[in-house]
Image (cartoon, grey):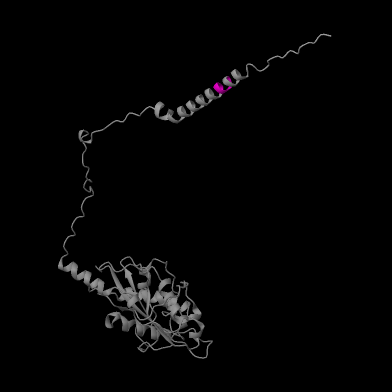
């Protein structure tokens, strides 16, 4: 039996070359990746294009300094100098102005509108004839609201045995007070239901400003008549039962008969608001007053009205 030798084949003779190629591939890949990394890092500096910068020479631009223009509004004209007469007139007007802060007592409550119609129970007809003269009583027509001239010339009946009132023989204040005493009979009137006869008086108004030589007698008589009528309509019941009080009110009347804002002002209070309010309301309800006389050259007059509750006309106490 013949002996057969075994064959041996070389199966890994290219193993060394394969390993060499594998190393070359890895090295090449590493170099490529490294190159790409370097390219990414330096690409902004290489690829970025610089922006052109324009240099401007400011000295060649002709710059100008701007200044605010002058004010185009016209300058106020100088005030003309006042004449001595105008200065005296302004000084007199300032001295006659009533300042509410300088007054001793100021009435704060709201004004109460008083009716302008006559109230027979309140004795609001000072021009009526006294008791016992019913045969000579004449009905007094109610004039329109603005026909003030009719009130000035209304005839007033005189009591029996006495002559009619003659204004030229007495001052306006004395004449109106005496006329009111005679026409009322018992002072005040309108309190027959109470325990006593009430006495409601309003002395003749006092002018606190310069009259410029004008006679305000007829004008004040019309004012007093209208104010008394409105006052009688709102007198409280406590005064008809004898409560006493004195209220003094000051206010200004303009050329057209209007009263400035913030007036009238109570300069002397009775100490009881229910007595101050009717007096205050009678002034407000009588507005607007008739225009001042045409011959009066001033701008306004300052009046003082006194309201007496159950006090005589010559009362001057607190």
Q: Which residues are magenta?
A: 21-25
The spot of residue 126 in percent (x, y) is: 42, 80
Q: On the image, which quarter does residue 97 sit in?
A: bottom left
Magenta-drawn stretch contains 23? yes
Q: Residue furthest bottom?
A: 195
Q: Identify the residue at image location x=40%, y=27%.
A: 46
Q: On the image, which quarter does residue 270 sit in?
A: bottom left
Which one is in front, 185 or 194?
Answer: 194
Numbered-mark total: 0
Which one is in front, 227 or 164?
Answer: 227
Which one is in front, 183 or 278?
Answer: 278
Q: Locate the C terminus and report the quarter of the image it occupies.
A: bottom left
| In the rendered image, the vertical position of residue 116 relative to residue 183, given as above or below | above
Magenta-drawn stretch contains 62? no
The spot of residue 66 in percent (x, y) is: 22, 42
Q: Horizontally, is 232 left or right of 303 in the view?
A: right
């Amino acid at each position: 039996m013949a002996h057969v030798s075994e064959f041996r084949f070389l199966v890994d003779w290219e193993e060394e070359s394969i390993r060499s190629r594998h190393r070359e591939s890895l090295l090449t890949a590493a170099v490529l990746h490294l190159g790409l990394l370097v390219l990414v890092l330096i690409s902004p500096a290489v690829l970025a294009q610089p922006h052109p910068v324009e240099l401007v020479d400011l000295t060649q631009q002709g710059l100008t300094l701007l200044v605010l223009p002058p004010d185009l509004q016209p300058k106020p004209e100088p005030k003309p100098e006042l004449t001595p007469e105008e200065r005296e007139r302004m000084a007199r007007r300032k001295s006659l102005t009533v300042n509410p802060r300088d007054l001793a007592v100021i009435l704060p409550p709201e004004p109460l509108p008083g009716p302008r119609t006559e109230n027979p129970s309140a004795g609001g007809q000072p021009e009526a004839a006294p008791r016992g003269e019913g045969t000579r009583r004449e009905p007094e027509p109610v004039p329109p609201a603005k026909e003030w001239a009719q009130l000035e010339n209304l005839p007033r009946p005189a009591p029996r045995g006495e002559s009619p009132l003659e204004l030229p023989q007495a001052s306006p204040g004395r004449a109106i007070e005496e006329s009111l005493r005679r026409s009322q009979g018992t002072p005040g009137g309108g309190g027959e239901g109470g325990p006593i006869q009430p006495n409601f008086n309003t002395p003749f108004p006092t002018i606190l400003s310069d009259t410029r030589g004008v006679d305000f007698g007829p004008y004040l008589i019309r004012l007093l008549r209208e104010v008394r009528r409105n006052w009688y309509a709102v007198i409280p019941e406590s005064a008809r039962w004898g409560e006493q009080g004195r209220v003094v009110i000051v206010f200004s009347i303009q050329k057209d008969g209007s009263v400035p804002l913030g007036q009238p002002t109570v300069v002397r209070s009775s100490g009881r608001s229910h007595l101050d309010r009717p007096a205050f309301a009678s002034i407000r309800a009588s507005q607007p007053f008739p225009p001042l006389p045409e011959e009066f050259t001033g701008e306004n007059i300052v009046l003082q009205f006194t309201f007496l509750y159950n006090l005589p006309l010559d009362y001057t106490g607190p």
